[in-house]
Image (cartoon, rainbow, N blue to C red):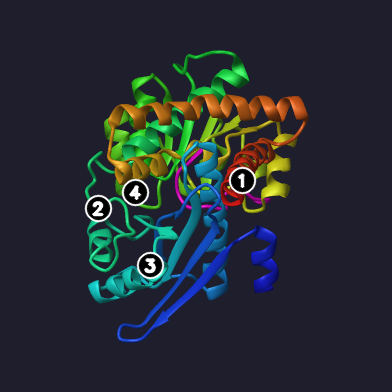
Amino acid sequence: MLLFETVREMGHEQVLFCHGKNPEIKAIIAIHDTSLGPAMGATRLFPYVSEEAALKDALRLSRGMTYKAACANIPAGGGKAVIIANPENKTDDLLRAYGRFVNSINGRFITGQDVNITPDDVRTIGQETQYVVGLSEKSGGPAPITSLGVFLGIKAAVEFRWQTKRLDGLKVAVQGLGNVGKNLCRHLHEHDVQLFVTDIDPAKAEEVKQLYGATVVEPSEIYSVDVDVFAPCALGAILNSHTIPFLKASIVAGAANNQLENEQLHSQMLVKKGILYSPDYVINAGGLINVYNEMIGYDEEKALKQVHNIYNTLLAIFDIAKQQGITTNDAAKRLAEDRIARGRSKTNKAIAA
């Protein structure tokens, strides 16, 4: 990876490499764009196979947060942070050291909870910085509202594809049964959807089977299940040259970030297979909407209204893609970049005045 060339191509404003001793810590904070407001993005702690892999994840996730905020009409920019560590080596001292790194940026980056970071960990980070969200969990945490947004996104895709608002009788495959995936299964079950589920933890799959009558399949088989909708809710890069040929679903709509391993190549592959793709940073924006509203003073009615707008935004993106003959991924990027450009224009006019 050519570091500076990659950062330039992806449009990042700032990338910080945080290294410390006593405790030993390696972290990367990527700030993609602050045209619409301070960069918001959660922190992920993960034992990456290499520092290059960690940087790639931070860069892609932070850019996705910029587009996510713009498509959700949230006055925030995009950022992301990764801590390179094994979860079993996580300590309060490490989290507090990381909190001091976040604090040193003076509010350009506001962070919260992602993979292997718990609400208690966020509170520990918050002992060293005020630039964290999700401390109070006034809304009950991000998973329920994120899963609601994904459910609404599935409804939008079904309406666009088959001109129906009904879900009963549809077959949906859910990959990953963490808090979001499990909550999504509940929404789908309540609308008489036939569920096919998988998780690397067999106990999670068994629980959803008992709760919602789901059919459990092996993780390697979830792509080839004959279903109407495939909902990836685990880690990213699962839509790639190996997995896409196996897909039988007509719609891909799930909560995972960075689902496309290669955005251009694999979005085109989905189009050629006749699969309608719901861009991940649009459909899974509920978590960002949740923490943003907690930050400004939680108003449940306002937050739910913003989440329900995911439905309308996706319908608009599908229509743009159809009318302009482009992928839904490109249509979502154009929508986001147009809103970001308008934000920059307003800022420049204000400075000039």
Q: Is residue 90 left or right of residue 231?
A: left
At mark 2, the secondary structure is: loop
Residue 309 can be seen, yes or no? yes
- Mark in the foreground, 4 or 3: 3
> Looking at this view, is 144 or 302 the one in front?
302
Q: Is residue 91 left or right of residue 330?
A: left
Residue 339 locus on image (x, y percent): 60, 39
Q: Which mark is residue 102?
A: 3
- Mark in the foreground, 1 or 4: 1
Query: Is 282 placed above or below 259 here?
Result: above
Q: Which amino acid, by three-letter code, is at mark 4? A: Pro
**Disc 4 and disc 2: Cα gap in Å?**
31 Å
User: Which residues lie in the magenta part?
Assistant: 231-242
Residue of label 4: 202
**Disc 1 and disc 3: Cα gap in Å?**
30 Å
Tell me if label 4 and label 3 are in contact, CB under 8 Å: no
**What type of secondary structure mainly makes up the magenta span?**
loop
At mark 4, the secondary structure is: helix
Residue 228 can be seen, yes or no? no
At mark 1, the secondary structure is: helix
Give the mark nearest the N terminus, 2 or 1.
Answer: 2
Whether the magenta-drawn stretch holds residue 168 is answered as: no
Tell me if label 2 and label 3 are in contact, CB under 8 Å: no
Q: Callout 4: 10 Å neighbours few (<14), some, many (20+)?
A: some
**Disc 1 and disc 4: Cα gap in Å?**
56 Å
Residue of label 1: 349
Q: Callout 3: 10 Å neighbours few (<14), some, many (20+)?
A: many
Q: Residue furthest front?
A: 353
Point 35% across, 68% down: residue: 103
Q: Is residue 69 left or right of residue 345?
A: left
Q: Residue furthest right?
A: 325
